[in-house]
C-alpha cells in the first residue's frame, strides 16, 4: 500500500513515525492528485511527497516538479485537504472552522501553502528566478460547502481548488507545466543549495535597523570590525576564517551579533544567526522579527545545519556558542544523518566565516562543549585561521566588574576563594532572610517600574500543570511558588517558557537556568538550593540534591561540580542593578550574611 511505503521512508530517512490518520490521508489524497495529473496529460510531472522545508521540521504535502512551456524548471506546492465542509472563524479571514475536526480553528489552507512558498523562495537557491505556485486542494469539498474560504485567495502562491473545480485545477496545472519529464527539475530542487535570498536579507536588514539602538564600544567595535574584515578577506582569498569573541555576561556579545547581521544583510552577504537555546532564539525571533515571519526564519538553531552545503553562507553567527553540543543528533534525526559528525564541524563547514560568541563559564549541561580551546583546536586542526577578541568590558550587573569578580571568587571559578562584598556604587547585593522577604523586596522594585525575576537551582520537582494551573513545586517552609511554564504555551497569566524572562507575568514563577540564560532584568533574586552549599568556607556540590534529569546518570562527580558552579554563575549574573540572595541551607545562609553584611 502507498501509505506503508511512505511511512517506511519517513521512519528510515527522517526518524518520523506517522500516525494512522496521516497514513489514511495519503491513501485518500495522493491518488486523487496523481489522477488529476494523468488526466491533464502531465503524467511525467514529479510528485515530491512529504517534502521537508529546509532547516525546519515542517513538511509540505507535495511539491510538483516539472518543466514549463519555455523549457525552465517549474514547481507547484500542493497542500491536500480532505475537508468536506468548512467556514470562516468569527469573520477572521485567516482562520477557519472545519466540521468534525477537533482542536479549534485552523489556518486558512491558502495562507498555509502561501507561507510554504514564501519560505521556499527565501531559502532554496534553485528557486531563484523559477516559477513557483501554491495550491490548496480541497478535493472532497463542493464549492457550496466552503463558500467562506473561496474569497480569500489573493496570490498565485495561494490558489484554492475544490472538488467542484477539478477541471479548473487541471487547466491550472497545464498552464504551469508542459508534458516534458520532470525528474531533472525534481533532482535539482532536492539537491539545491540552501541559503537566505537577497530579498529576505534586505527585509532582515530593515527590521534589524529598527532595533539598533546601541553603540559599540572598544572591544565590541573591534570584534565587529574584525568580523567584517574576515568576511572581506575570506571572499578575496577564497578561504575560510574563524572568529572567536569571548566575554562574560553582559559584555555585549549579542549586541555585536545583531550589528554584524544587519550590516551583512545591507551588503548583500548571505548570513544566518544560530543559538543552542530555545528561549534565546524564540526571544530574538519575537523581538527582531516581530510581525514579520520571514525575518523570524533568519534565526536558527545549532542543529539546523546537518545537511547544509559546505560554504553555502558567507557568515554563520553562533551566539551563546558555549551551548554547542557533541553532535546535533536527536530522536527526530534522519537515519542518513546519524553519522556521529561533530556539531562544531557542521557549524564551521557551512560558512566562509563562522563567528562564535561565548562565555566558557556558562556551560551548564552535560554534553555542552563550547569553549575557546575546543573551537580553536578544531578549526586549526582543519587548517583554518582563527582570530580571537576578548570583551573585557562589563555591561550587565550595572557595569560592575567588581560584582562579576566577586561571583567568580564566591563560586571558586577564580582566585583563592570567597571574599567579602566591598560594595559598588553601580550595583547592590543583598541577602534576604527568607524567600518571602526576597519576593517582597523584588515586588517593590516591580512596583517602581523596574523589571525583576526570581530564579533557583533545580532542586525541586517540576510538575506538569494540573487543571490548567501551575503546581507550586518550589516549597521552602511555608513559602511556595511554581516553576516557570515548561512548554511554549502560556498557562493562565504565566508566559510560555521562552518568554519567561521578558514577558509580563513572569515574576509569579521561579525561573531555572534554562529559561534565564542569555537574558537580563533589572533586579535578580537567586535561591541557592541544597545542591551547592558552604562547608568549611568553600562551596561543595551535592549531586544527590539535584532534580535536574540531565545530571542523573551522565556526569562524573567532578563534571557535576563544574557544571553546578557554572549554573549558579549564570543565575547570579542576570541582574543589571542588583541581586538578592537566599540559601535554603542554614550554614550557607549564614556565610552569605557574613560576606555581604
Image: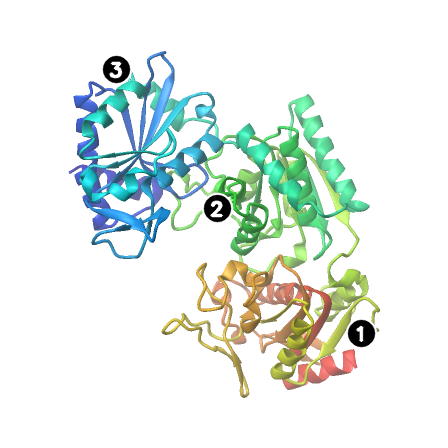
Return the x and y of residue 510 as percentages of the image width and height: 55, 72
Q: Mark 2 points at which residue?
A: 328
Residue 417 in view in this figure: no
Q: Nearer the viewer, mark 3 or mark 2?
A: 3
Return the x and y of residue 295 as percentages of the image width and height: 54, 41
Asked if marks 2 and 1 touch (Cβ < 8 Å), the reply is: no
Choose the circle earlier in sequence order: 3 or 2.
3
Q: Residue at x 65, y 33 (%)?
A: 264
Q: Residue at x 66, y 61 (%)?
A: 520
Side of 73 where 229 appears, left or right = right
Label 2 secondary element: loop
Q: Residue at x 45, y 61 (%)?
A: 487
Q: How far apart are marks 3 and 2 (CA)?
A: 42 Å
Side of 518 where 251 appears, left or right = right
Side of 191 where 39 appears, left or right = left
In this rendering, the answer to whether 155 lies above or below 10 is above
Choose the circle earlier in sequence order: 3 or 1.
3
Instruction: Report the front residue among 98 and 185.
Output: 98
Label 3 secondary element: loop
Q: Which of marks 2 and 1 is in front?
A: 1
In this rendering, the answer to whether 523 lies above or below 80 is below
Q: Name the residue under label 1.
A: 421
The quarter in which the N terminus is drawn is: top left
In this rendering, the answer to whether 155 lies above or below 430 is above
Q: How far apart are marks 2 and 1 (CA)?
A: 42 Å
Return the x and y of residue 36 as percentages of the image width and height: 19, 27
Label 1 secondary element: loop
Side of 95 where 536 appears, left or right = right
Asked if marks 3 and 2 touch (Cβ < 8 Å), the reply is: no
Q: Mark 3 points at which residue?
A: 179
In this rendering, the answer to whether 418 lies above or below 123 is below
Amino acid at each position: 500500500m502507498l501509505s506503508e511505503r511512505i511511512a517506511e521512508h519517513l521512519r528510515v530517512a527522517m526518524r518520523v513515525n506517522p500516525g494512522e490518520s496521516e497514513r489514511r490521508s495519503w491513501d485518500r489524497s495522493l491518488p486523487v492528485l496523481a489522477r488529476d495529473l494523468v488526466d491533464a496529460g502531465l503524467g511525467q510531472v514529479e510528485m515530491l511527497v512529504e517534502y521537508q522545508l529546509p532547516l525546519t521540521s515542517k513538511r509540505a504535502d507535495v511539491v510538483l516538479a516539472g518543466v514549463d512551456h519555455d523549457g525552465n524548471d517549474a514547481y507547484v506546492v500542493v497542500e491536500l485537504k480532505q475537508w468536506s465542509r468548512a467556514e470562516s472563524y468569527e469573520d477572521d479571514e485567516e482562520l477557519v472552522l472545519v466540521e468534525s475536526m477537533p482542536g479549534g480553528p485552523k489556518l486558512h489552507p491558502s495562507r498555509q501553502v502561501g507561507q510554504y512558498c514564501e519560505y521556499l523562495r527565501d531559502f532554496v537557491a534553485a528557486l531563484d528566478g523559477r516559477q513557483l505556485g501554491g495550491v490548496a486542494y480541497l478535493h472532497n469539498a463542493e464549492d457550496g460547502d466552503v463558500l467562506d474560504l473561496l474569497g480569500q485567495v489573493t496570490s498565485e502562491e495561494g490558489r484554492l481548488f475544490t472538488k467542484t473545480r477539478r477541471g479548473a485545477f487541471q487547466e491550472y496545472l497545464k498552464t504551469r507545466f508542459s508534458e516534458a519529464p520532470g525528474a531533472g527539475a525534481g533532482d535539482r530542487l532536492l539537491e539545491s543549495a540552501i541559503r537566505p535570498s537577497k530579498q529576505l536579507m534586505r527585509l532582515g536588514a530593515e527590521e534589524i535597523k529598527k532595533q539598533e539602538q546601541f553603540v559599540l564600544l572598544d572591544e565590541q567595535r573591534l570584534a565587529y570590525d574584525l568580523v567584517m574584515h574576515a568576511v572581506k578577506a575570506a571572499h578575496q582569498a577564497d578561504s575560510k576564517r574563524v572568529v572567536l569573541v569571548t566575554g562574560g555576561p553582559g559584555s555585549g556579545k549579542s549586541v555585536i551579533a545583531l550589528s554584524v547581521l544587519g550590516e551583512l544583510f545591507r551588503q548583500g552577504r548571505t548570513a544566518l544567526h544560530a543559538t543552542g537555546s530555545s528561549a534565546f532564539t524564540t526571544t530574538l525571533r519575537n523581538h527582531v522579527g516581530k510581525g514579520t515571519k520571514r525575518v523570524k526564519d533568519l534565526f536558527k538553531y545549532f542543529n539546523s545545519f546537518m545537511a547544509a552545503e559546505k560554504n553555502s553562507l558567507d557568515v554563520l553567527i553562533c551566539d551563546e556558542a558555549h551551548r554547542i553540543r557533541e553532535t546535533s543528533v536527536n530522536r527526530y534525526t534522519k537515519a542518513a544523518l546519524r553519522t556521529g559528525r561533530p556539531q562544531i564541524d557542521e557549524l564551521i563547514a557551512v560558512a566562509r566565516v563562522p563567528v562564535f560568541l561565548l562565555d566558557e563559564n556558562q556551560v551548564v549541561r552535560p554534553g555542552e562543549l563550547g569553549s575557546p580551546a575546543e573551537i580553536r583546536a578544531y578549526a586549526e586542526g582543519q587548517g583554518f585561521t582563527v582570530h580571537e577578541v576578548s570583551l573585557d568590558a562589563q555591561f550587565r550587573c550595572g557595569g560592575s566588574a567588581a560584582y562579576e569578580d566577586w561571583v567568580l571568587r564566591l563560586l571558586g571559578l577564580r582566585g583563592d576563594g570567597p571574599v567579602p562584598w566591598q560594595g559598588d556604587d553601580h550595583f547592590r547585593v543583598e541577602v534576604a532572610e527568607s524567600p518571602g522577604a526576597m519576593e517582597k523586596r523584588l515586588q517593590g522594585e516591580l512596583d517602581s517600574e523596574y523589571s525583576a525575576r526570581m530564579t533557583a537551582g533545580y532542586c525541586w520537582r517540576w510538575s506538569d500543570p494540573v487543571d490548567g494551573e501551575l503546581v507550586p513545586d518550589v516549597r521552602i517552609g511555608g513559602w511556595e511558588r511554581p516553576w516557570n511554564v515548561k512548554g511554549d504555551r502560556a498557562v493562565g497569566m504565566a508566559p510560555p517558557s521562552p518568554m519567561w524572562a521578558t514577558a509580563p507575568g513572569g515574576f509569579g514563577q521561579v525561573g531555572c537556568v534554562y529559561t534565564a540564560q542569555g537574558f537580563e532584568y533589572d533586579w535578580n533574586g537567586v535561591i541557592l538550593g541544597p545542591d551547592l552549599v558552604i562547608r568549611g568556607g568553600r562551596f561543595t556540590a551535592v549531586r544527590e540534591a539535584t532534580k535536574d534529569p540531565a545530571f542523573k546518570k551522565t556526569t562524573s562527580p567532578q563534571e557535576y561540580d563544574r557544571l553546578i558552579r557554572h549554573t549558579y554563575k549564570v543565575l547570579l549574573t542576570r541582574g543589571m542593578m542588583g541581586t538578592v540572595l537566599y540559601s535554603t541551607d542554614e550554614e550557607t545562609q549564614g556565610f552569605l550574611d557574613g560576606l555581604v553584611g
